[in-house]
Image (cartoon, rainbow, N blue to C red):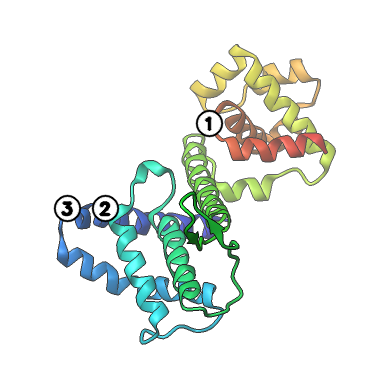
Amino acid sequence: MLNVLLIFAARRNKKRQLEILAKEIQEGNEEALNQVLVDYKPFVKKTVSSVCKRYIYESDDEFSIGLIAFHDALLKYNSDRGASLLSFAEVIIKRKVIDYIRMNGRHQNISVEVNTETEDGEVQNRITDTLSMEEYDRARVANERKEEILAFTRKLKEYSLRFDDLVKNSPKHEDARQNAISIAELVVSTPSLLEYLQEKKRLPVKQLEKEVGFSRKTIERNRKYIIAITIIMMGDFNYLKDYLKGRMKQ
């Protein structure tokens, strides 16, 4: 799990660097533009290949369309939209390539809408926006989940915990997990217990022993897991809370 988080962190830094460069490009930095276009050719190839269902060469027209679309994405990207630049660029590239395929009558395994007619009688071929927006939304959600995990990991450090500690110390039996969750709920709902945890960065074991009826040994054994669940409950971790709700229903 720790290795996965390190990979997430590295990718996150790379994405941030790209978004910084995008701002410079939007301000007219031609050198940054040329470098980004070269560096992200593999990304463009991969995205175009996913549409065309075949390997894409730089000599292919579809690659040129994809590269132009990536250029457009760099110029139009706005971080306020809530997704990463690459997620946004992927949608733009796929739309442009699908549009090119339709215009040239090349039958590929892609999803398109039937012809529709505008109010003035012109026949208009439209690419299915639903597919692209679903892909955009999936990418946005995946990015938000990664960001949330990273934020959660930073919060754990305040309590001298690591993400991989939770994997190792997660209760093996379902009833033990439910008991740990119940203890965490008690901590969150009891101001004195919560204040103790936040100030001391450790569980008020003596008080909990009196409140919940579990032995000190049981509470200590699941200490790391209880603290982690408490952090999720009291923090802005919506995806982790949804997962936790699923665990509570089991």
Q: Secondary structure at mark 1?
A: loop
Q: Which mark is residue 20?
A: 2
Task: Look at label 2 and name its amino acid.
Answer: Ile
Please say if the residues under marks 3 and 2 sit with CB atoms less than 8 Å apart. Answer: no
Task: State whether residue 223 is above or below residue 170.
Answer: above
| Residue 27: image tag | 3
Task: Classify mark 3: helix, strand or loop.
Answer: loop
210 w.r.t. 237: above or below: above
Residue 20: x and y in percent read: 26, 53
Task: Label 2, secondary structure: give it.
Answer: helix
The image shows a total of numbered marks equal to 3
Q: Write down the quadrant of residue 42 in the picture.
A: bottom left
Mark nearer the N terminus (3 vs 2): 2
* Type of amino acid at the residue the image marks with label 1: Asp
Q: Earlier in the sequence, mark 1 or mark 2?
A: 2
Label 1–label 2 contact, CB within 8 A: no
The tag on residue 146 is: none
Point 75% across, 15% down: residue = 211
Q: Position of residue 125 (x, y in %)?
A: 51, 63
Q: CA distance from mark 3 to mark 1?
A: 35 Å
* Three-letter residue code for mark 3: Glu
Front: mark 3 or 2: 3
| Residue 146 horizontal side relative to residue 213, left or right | left
Q: CA distance from mark 3 to mark 2?
A: 11 Å
> Which numbered mark, 1 or 2, is in the foreground of this view?
2
Spot occupied by residue 195 in the image (x, y as percentages of width and height): 54, 17
Name the residue that disc number 1 marks. 236
User: Where residue 217 sits: x, y (%)?
Assistant: 75, 32
